[in-house]
């Protein structure tokens, strides 16, 4: 049976067409753009342990972050290589396999929490805070705090030498 292009979407909406290959949301992006977006968001979540993004992106990000933590819990070389190929950041992967894998070794899934955070002022998009369940509260902004401390120490040393 032949369905015109407009009729096939109507049939899908009525439940007459199977959902093959429609697991994730598309977000009006190509596959490579989506993959890069979620790789970067996953890296940000794993390094800061809490980020604020739109609600649909947070719900999709859950699956990627949970699968990365599951890979880290396995701890073998193949899992590490898969994590590096997805995240493309060695610092995040080392934190994932050392700190986060140890933290969640007794938990069977459900490593992330999505909290609704109101709407965004500019376009009224639903916002959410996604965080790791047993997160380290000092992890968010830790790099910035360390950088500022180094700058202050260098400045004090420069004043001392003058």
Image (spheres, grey):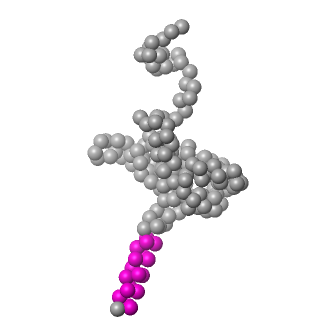
Dominant secondary structure (helix, strand or loop) of the stretch shown in magenta: helix
Q: Nearer the viewer, residue 31 or 45?
A: 31
Number of numbered discs visible in the structure rendering:
0
Residue 99 location, quadrant: bottom right
Q: Is residue 146 on the magenta stretch?
A: yes
Furthest-right residue in this view = 76
Residue 18 location, quadrant: top right
Q: Residue at x 54, y 8 (%)?
A: 1
On screen, residue 148 above or below 113: below
Residue 54 location, quadrant: top left
Q: Is residue 100 visible?
A: no
Furthest-left residue in this view = 122
Q: Position of residue 40 (x, y in %)?
A: 48, 51
Q: Residue at x 65, y 60 (%)?
A: 102
Range of the magenta residues? 145-161
Q: Is residue 29 on the magenta stretch?
A: no
Q: Nearer the viewer, residue 111 or 42?
A: 42
> Does residue 153 appear left or right of residue 42 in this picture?
left
Q: Residue at x 48, y 11 (%)?
A: 3
Q: Position of residue 131 (x, y in %)?
A: 50, 53
Q: Is residue 138 visible?
A: yes
> Does residue 15 appear left or right of residue 117 in this picture?
right
Q: Position of residue 139 (x, y in %)?
A: 50, 64
Q: Position of residue 79 (x, y in %)?
A: 67, 51
Q: Residue at x 53, y 29 (%)?
A: 22
Which quarter of the image is occupied by the C terminus? bottom left
């Amino acid at each position: 049976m032949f369905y015109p292009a407009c009729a096939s979407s109507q049939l899908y909406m009525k439940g007459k067409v199977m959902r093959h290959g429609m697991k994730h949301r598309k977000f009006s992006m190509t596959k490579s753009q989506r993959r890069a977006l979620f790789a970067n968001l996953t890296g940000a979540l794993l390094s800061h342990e809490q980020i604020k993004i739109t609600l649909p992106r947070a719900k999709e990000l859950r699956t990627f972050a949970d699968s990365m933590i599951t890979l880290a819990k396995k701890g073998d070389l193949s899992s590490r290589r898969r994590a590096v190929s997805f995240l493309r950041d060695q610092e995040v992967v080392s934190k994932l396999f050392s700190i986060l894998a140890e933290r969640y070794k007794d938990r069977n899934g459900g490593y992330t929490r999505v909290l609704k955070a109101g709407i965004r002022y500019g376009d009224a998009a639903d916002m959410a805070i996604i965080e790791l369940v047993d997160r380290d509260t000092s992890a968010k902004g830790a790099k910035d705090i360390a950088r500022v401390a180094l700058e202050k120490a260098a400045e004090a040393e420069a004043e001392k030498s003058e």
